[in-house]
Every structure is written in structure tokens, then in C-alpha cells.
Image (spheres, rainbow, N blue to C red):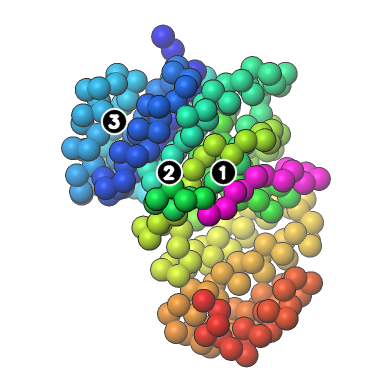
Amino acid sequence: MKPFFSIILPTYNRGYILENSIKSIIRQEFSNWELIVIDDGSTDDTSEVIKKYLELDKRINYYYQRNSERSAARNNGIAKAEGDFITFLDSDDQFEEKHLKNLFDSINKSIEKSVVFVTGSQIVDTNGKLLSVSQIKPKNCDSETILENTITPGQMCIPSNFLRKHLFNEKIRISEDTELLFRLIEDAPLKILDYTSLLYIHHVGNSINPFKNNVYLERKKTLELIFKLSVGKKVSSRIKRKVLSDCFFGISKYYAANSNNWMVRWSMIKAIIQYPEQRFKEKFYLVLFPKKSI
């Protein structure tokens, strides 16, 4: 039977945590799915971890590729997907048991199927303790919704024939999901769903770690590319300044963690210049006392 959902799970050296993600899919109340695991050149025990699941459940497929980063892995999974709709799960995150059932019901109730369905998410620690809930707040237009909320691939569900026309930009390492969404909304709107069934697991190995990696500098570069797109050009000056200010604020945290006080001050001043309307006193204080930025 043709699967309704194709779940694409890219992974790289996550053998120590991958099982939790796979188990969360097997436990789904909705059963008509296929799981496509794309191993992006792992050198740990990832292949051994997944081997038993391949024997246990025929809905699970495993493919190994040379290390090419997660966008290439996701695109590889999209090419292999047979489902009507595609969703994603990172190898350190999980779905709640009703995630696919809720998506299926929402899709069936929707008059328009050529939309990007988006759920909220919950951030939990490795012990399952809830840290925060991220419920998407729709704005006046989809571009503002994307920029003023966190929307990860795990929150997206997209018609497969539609997604294949866009794909992830493999040259982008950070905020590649944001850039994809901007291209998607040129042809289809977002449909924000009111449940938070993606579990984003916060742990020391998260790739998006502003203290270990200068991810906000990379995000700033991606945003500058987005603002050159036809939809990006329509984003208001206020929103552009706000999100760029947030980037400079994040950049300053990276430099603070690496004891580069001059770059902390420079980044924080840029944050103030871009958007002085928000957190001005805090930003100015951190210019004077950069070590407090962490």
C-alpha cells in the first residue's frame, strides 16, 4: 500500500540517540507511513543501531551517502519518498504519538491541499522535562510568520509533488529551512495548526548551539539571501531590521563565550543600530559589560 506520509530522517553520528527518534515513529497512532533514514556518512555505530529496526519494521528504509550535510540528505530522502505528503524528523528529536494522526485529520479537513502545514513544538531536555512550548503565532503575512517564529523542518508537512519543485538549497548550512519556506510560499500559503506534537530535544550535542558555533553569523548571511528573493523583497523594513538585530545579538553571545570582548561590543552596537526599539537598555548594558552577554 502506498504510504500517506514519507518521514525523512537525516542523521550523522547520532547512533547514541537515534533509537529514540525511530521509536517515536513506530509508536505513531497513524500507521500508513514510511520512514526514510538518510545516513550522511556516519562513522559511529549508526548502521548497527538501525539494523534491528529494518528487520523489525518493513516501513523503515535506510540509505547511506557520503557526508554532504543535512540539506543534501533531506533532498536525497525527498527523491526516494513515495508518500503523498512529506514531513521531517531530525535524529535527535521525536514525534508525540498523535503527531501523524493530527496531521492526517488536518489535511483531510482542509479544503485546500496545496499548502504548507505547520505545527508548533515543545522543547524538552533529555529527561523529558518540558522547557518551553513554541506555538506558531500567525502574522499579517506568511513572510512575517516565518521570520518572527521558529519553524523547523520537523514542524512542516508538505505535499510531495509540490516539495520536489523546490528542495533545500544545499549551499546553505544554517536557516536552510527558513530559505526553503520563503520559496514555498511563493506558490502556496502556510496553514498553521494548533498543536505542538514535535518534541525538540535540547542537549549538549545540538548542532544549533550559539556558544559553540557562530550560527547567527550564518543565519545573517542566509537572511540577506532571502531578502533578495521576490517574496523577501516585500518584507517590511521594520521586520528586516528586527531579525538582523537578533542575529547580531546572537553573534555577540558566540564572541562572549569565546572571550572576544571587542567583537561582543561591535556585535551589540550593530544590534542597537539595526533595531534600537527593542531591548535597548539591555543591549547598551552589554556593550559596557560584554562578559555578561553569556
| Bounds of the magenta segment | 131-142
- The residue indicated by pointer 2 is 93
Image coordinates for residue 127, horizontal then vertical, percent: 40, 50
Q: Quadrant of residue 121?
A: top right
The magenta stretch spans residue 197: no
Q: Nearer the viewer, residue 166 or 77?
A: 77
Type of amino acid at the residue the image marks with label 1: Ser
**Residue 132 among magenta residues:** yes
Q: Could you tell which of marks 1 and 2 lies nearer the N-terminus?
A: 2
Label 1 sits on residue: 121
Residues marked 3 and 2 touching at CB (< 8 Å): no
- Which amino acid, by three-letter code, is at mark 2? Asp
The residues bearing labels 1 and 3 have C-alpha atoms spaced at a distance of 26 Å
Q: Can the viewer see residue 90 in this picture?
A: yes
The N terminus appears in which quarter of the rendering?
top left
Residue in view at x 53 percent, y 88 percent = 262
Q: Is residue 260 above or below residue 66?
A: below
**Dot label at residue 62:** 3
